[in-house]
Amino acid sequence: MRLSIAVVAINAAALASIGTLAFSPSRLSQLPRVSKSLAPQTEEVLPAFSSKSNVSPSSAYNRPSHLSMGYKYDPKNSNIFDGPLALTKERDACGVGFIANPIQGGEYGTHKVLQQGLAALSCMEHRGACGGDGVSGDGAGIMTMIPWKLFEEYRTENVPFPGVGMVFLPQDEGRRNSIKTLIEDVCRDNELEFVAWREVPVDESVLGPMARDAVPAMWQMVVRPSKRLEDDADRLGFCRSLYLVRRRFEVERKKQGLWWDDDDNVVYVASLSSRTIVYKGMVQSCILPEFYLDLKNPDYTTKFCIYHRRFSTNTVPKWPLAQPMRVLGHNGEINTLLGNMNWIRAREKSKGLPASSQLEDLVSYESTDNIVQLCNTQDVPDVLEPLVDPGRSDSANLDGVFELMCRSRHRTACALMCLVPTAYEDEPALADNPEITDFYRFHGGLLEAWDGPALLVYSDGLSIGASLDRNGLRPARFSRTKDGSVFVMSETGVVPELYEADIIEKGRLGPGQMINVDLWSGEFKDNIAIKSEIASRHPYGEWMERQRRDIPKMEPPTERIYDDETAMLAQATFGWGLEDIGMQIQDMAGGGKETTY
């Protein structure tokens, strides 16, 4: 106890000194120093793992990982006060970003984009967390366009872009085959032509003990659309069908009792799309390409790469909880989650079209369009997996709602503007764009905000972008280069060979701001440009002027509704005490606003 008190006292004295001294090298010697007997022992640095490294992960399981300075630093001989350990040694924020170049490489993109994304992911390692074995990670992953050269044998002239799914399955062969059969049957029952299973090449020897004990079997599935979707040139109907069929897998699994009460029970579809694919796992950043051997294949080409390094704050690390999710990569927390989930349940229930009349057909263009837009897909557990679930992480629930909106004819940027709005009231930056303010006012009455802090990176394979919530408490930097590349990252310096001479624009996202890149035209749009384009699609201001009804402030009634005895009974029934009435009800009634302390 004396030792810890002494350290706190020294740290407090040092902080006080920093506040009063000018921070210059000549005066650093005046700062108090922690004695060598109190200083923490220096840990050994764990070499990074790479294909060129002589150090294997298996030889370093029992060695502690440590983040080193970018310059030579000897704490024993330094007179620089590092600050309280709780502030200087903990880094509790995920690392997320994307790299996109829609111009180079033609239709399939380039392998360079993937390499840059993996390099940036490795440089984000300090923003994640690792397990007790020093090698397993909270999670790392990437989302890219489907590398069609790797799936060339499954493509045909009539179906050049089939649906590809990344599926986590049990390691036990018997269980795995049962789940495979279930998935194939569900696809065929919904007129999807099941083509093949592809075993994903992996190297489990690079995993830490904790990750290896929980690793699922990695398989990819390939399906072709129903013949009823032959005219679906833009593949929107096919993508909706894949989305709805995926939500049937877990329902059928429970119906058939394919559930096991042990560690080998993971069945999870990381992605199922005809445009994007997700590779992720419970690993550290540099281990991801060592584990998934596809990522080293030169035929793996893409126009974009979303990367994410996870720091788990409110959930135990698991393989399915690594990010990116199916359409989102999220750095932060959703602090309004409980209210958001309750409102989503209410919003889904208020949809007018009876689900029973539509959910038998998960294939036709019109039927799937009606289901995602007009049917309650939350409360049909015998047909579809619930849209939101308290058993999932905040990121997974946000991803689920965002994905539904993307399948409901919303562009990704539009969906995110609705879900995570900016603070638009009396905002000087929007003074010349009333259409944006009208958009937010209109949707504010339809959907409740998912508030962070949150940095969100998103893609549906058609466009890619990033947005900060209105709190703006997560860092987001971006750069554009002469060759058409766009880089977004939690911090600068993570992309190798990004030279200042090649940069034509750079900046950062502020609170509530967004950028967007069209993955086919290559067009880059900043915050005002993309939001103005989205908000100008409909006359939201005119709709509000014609249809909105404002409730004027009314004089309070002088007559009581309840007598003392009835009021006391009602208050006791609903758990209200004198403190609640005096501190909350009285304050709300007097001030006309929500109580704050």
Image: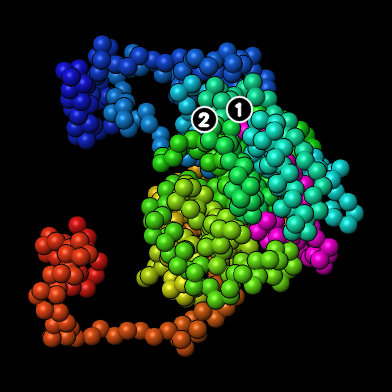
The label number, if any, that marks residue 166 in the structure image:
none
Seen in the picture, residue 75 relative to 222 is either above or below; the reply is above
Q: Residue furthest left?
A: 564
In this image, 425 relative to 96: left or right? left
Residue at left 38%, top 31%? 90
Q: Which residue is mark 2?
A: 137
Q: Which residue is mark 1?
A: 287
**Count of marks overlaid on the render:** 2
Residue 253 rendering spot, x and y as whole percentages: 62, 47
Residue stretch rendered in magenta on the structure: 216-245
Residue at left 84%, top 53%? 160
Q: Secondary structure at mark 1?
A: helix
When asked about the image quadrant of residue 218, the answer is top right
Circle 2 packing at 10 Å, graded few (<14), some (14-19), many (20+), is many
Q: Is residue 225 magenta?
A: yes
Q: Is residue 69 magenta?
A: no
When asked about the image quadrant of residue 91, the answer is top left
Q: Secondary structure at mark 2?
A: strand
